[in-house]
């Protein structure tokens, strides 16, 4: 059973912004490609695809995993972004092993999300040499 997780960043979109939403772009991922020796969480850590869409005020990431997050809910999902401002090539808001090299200057925004305990997400930004957040 495939399950979908949605993390929304920014303020709540108004009805007008929702009407003017840009259609999402879907990025597919090969399934079953998790490093041997790492738990797959019953498939919940195995990404199938990610859809990215936006309104004038929000960006939305819709992750589809190859498992049921209702039965295995301990996975954490992290997204790094580089906007061209000075960022970092190592580290993130939670100190997890996610790093990003970018010709645009490294990771300066980072989202950490989870599905356990009702699920939620945190937005962090990197300025003046440290992570600030959650926003």
Image (tube, rainbow, N blue to C red):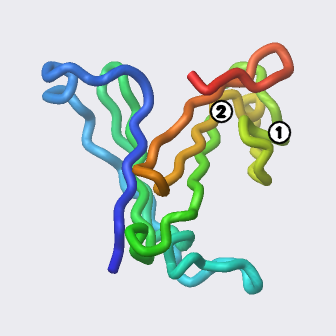
Q: Which residue is located at x 60 percent, y 49 percent?
A: 78
Q: Does residue 66 sit above or below 108 in this rendering? A: below
Q: Does residue 100 sit above or below 21 in this rendering? A: below
**The one of 77 and 69 positioned closer to us in this rendering:** 69
Q: Which sits earlier in the primary sequence, circle 2 or circle 1?
A: 2
Q: Does residue 32 sit above or below 131 in this rendering? A: below
Q: Quadrant of the N terminus?
A: bottom left
Give the distance between the C-alpha atoms of the residues marked 2 and 1, in whole angstroms. 10 Å
Q: Secondary structure at mark 1?
A: loop
Q: Does residue 34 sit above or below 131 in this rendering? A: below
Q: Quadrant of residue 21?
A: top left
Crowdedness near tag 1: few (<14), some (14–19) or many (≥20) residues, C-alpha within 10 Å: some
95 lies left or right of 115: right
Q: Secondary structure at mark 2?
A: loop
Is there any visible trace of residue 101 in the rendered image? no
Q: Which residue carries the number 1 mark?
A: 89
Q: Which residue is located at x 61 percent, y 26 percent?
A: 134
Is there any visible trace of residue 45 in the rendered image? yes
Crowdedness near tag 2: few (<14), some (14–19) or many (≥20) residues, C-alpha within 10 Å: many
Q: Which residue is located at x 37 percent, y 49 percent?
A: 6
Q: Which residue is located at x 65 percent, y 32 percent?
A: 82
Report x, y in % for residue 113.
54, 46
Please report contact status of discs 2 and 1: CB closer than 8 Å, yes or no.
no
**The one of 74 and 62 positioned closer to us in this rendering:** 74
69 lies left or right of 128: left
Q: Quadrant of residue 39?
A: bottom right
114 lies left or right of 24: right
**The one of 104 and 11 positioned closer to us in this rendering:** 11
Report x, y in % for residue 27.
44, 59
Q: Quadrant of the C terminus?
A: top right
Q: Quadrant of residue 106?
A: top right
Q: Which residue carries the number 2 mark?
A: 82
């Amino acid at each position: 059973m495939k399950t979908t997780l949605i993390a929304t960043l920014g303020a709540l979109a108004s009805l007008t912004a929702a009407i003017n939403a840009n259609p999402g772009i879907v990025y597919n991922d090969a399934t079953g490609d998790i490093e041997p020796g790492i738990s797959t969480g019953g498939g919940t850590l195995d990404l199938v695809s990610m859809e990215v869409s936006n309104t004038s005020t929000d960006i939305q990431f819709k992750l589809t995993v190859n498992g049921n997050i209702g039965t295995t809910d301990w996975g954490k999902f992290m997204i790094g972004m580089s906007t061209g401002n000075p960022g970092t090539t190592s580290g993130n808001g939670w100190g997890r092993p996610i790093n990003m090299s970018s010709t645009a200057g490294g990771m300066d925004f980072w989202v950490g999300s989870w599905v356990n305990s009702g699920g939620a997400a945190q937005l962090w930004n990197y300025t003046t040499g440290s992570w600030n957040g959650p926003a």
